[in-house]
Image (tube, grey):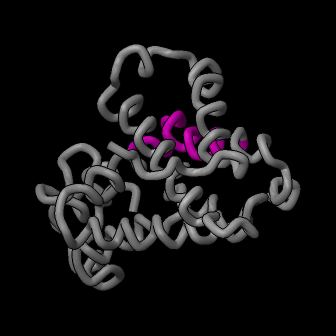
Amino acid sequence: MESALHLFAEHGYARTTIRAIAEAAQVDPALVHHFFDNKEGVFDAAVNSPLSVSSVFDELPPDMADAGTAEAAWLARAYLSFWESEETRYGMTAIYRAGLADSATSERLRARVEESTKNWAANSGYRDHPDAETRAALASGHLVGLALMRYVLKVHPLAEMDFEEFLAWVVPALELRLSTELEPRGAQKD
């Protein structure tokens, strides 16, 4: 799995082969086929692996279920820590690059993100709000966009910020995304 994720991150999904994955893992390609069937199977396993952040959001810690603004801080730190860590950043990069590369992997990533977003909304402090899933999806999009800008595209000044400074900017905006006191604006009138 680690070999595949390194290759997906370095070369992209399309240019990574079963043979290259097997060679990097120092195993016979038949072994990769036996356990994963094909490259799509390897990607599926990666999306649902412990190296994938989505499993973190399947269930919030019990003390977060009614925590309000503490929930935003926990979510931002939990998600962005996967990107910040040298051990898991390559996996995150690989999963998102591959997931955006073609329709087959996009569908797998989309399904996993939707599942995690629903679980997050169902376990969150705003779970009884009628638009809990919409708020969770908007918050997810906010975090993913910022992670891609900081860790993949390395957009200045986000990429150069200390992690704690970056969180200090991210958390208040995430709190707004999750606030049930704010409602969407009505349609604009001419």
Q: Is residue 85 magenta?
A: yes
Quick check: 45 above or below 164? Answer: below
Closest to the observer: 161 or 86? Answer: 161
Closest to the observer: 45 or 154? Answer: 154
Task: Locate residue 131, reporting x and y percent.
Answer: 61, 65
Residue 58 can be seen in this image: no
Q: Residue at x 32, y 79 (%)?
A: 36
Residue 176 can be seen in this image: yes
Q: Residue at x 69, y 71 (%)?
A: 122
Q: Is residue 113 magenta?
A: no
Quick check: 76 above or below 126? Answer: above
Give the position of the C terminus as an image quadrant.
top left
Closest to the observer: 106 or 98? Answer: 106
Give the position of the N terminus as an image quadrant.
bottom left
Task: Locate residue 165, reporting x and y percent.
Answer: 61, 18
Q: Is residue 53 left or right of residue 23?
A: right
Task: Locate residue 53, reporting x and y percent.
Answer: 54, 55
Q: Quadrant of residue 31?
A: bottom left
The magenta stretch is: 74-90
Q: Is residue 167 left or right of residue 61?
A: left
Quick check: 42 above or below 140? Answer: below
Task: Locate residue 163, reporting x and y percent.
Answer: 58, 23
Q: Residue furthest left?
A: 15
Give the tally of numbered discs. 0
Q: Quadrant of residue 85?
A: top right
Characterize the magenta stretch by its predominant secondary structure. Answer: helix
Q: Is residue 175 left or right of residue 4?
A: right
Closest to the observer: 185 or 73? Answer: 185
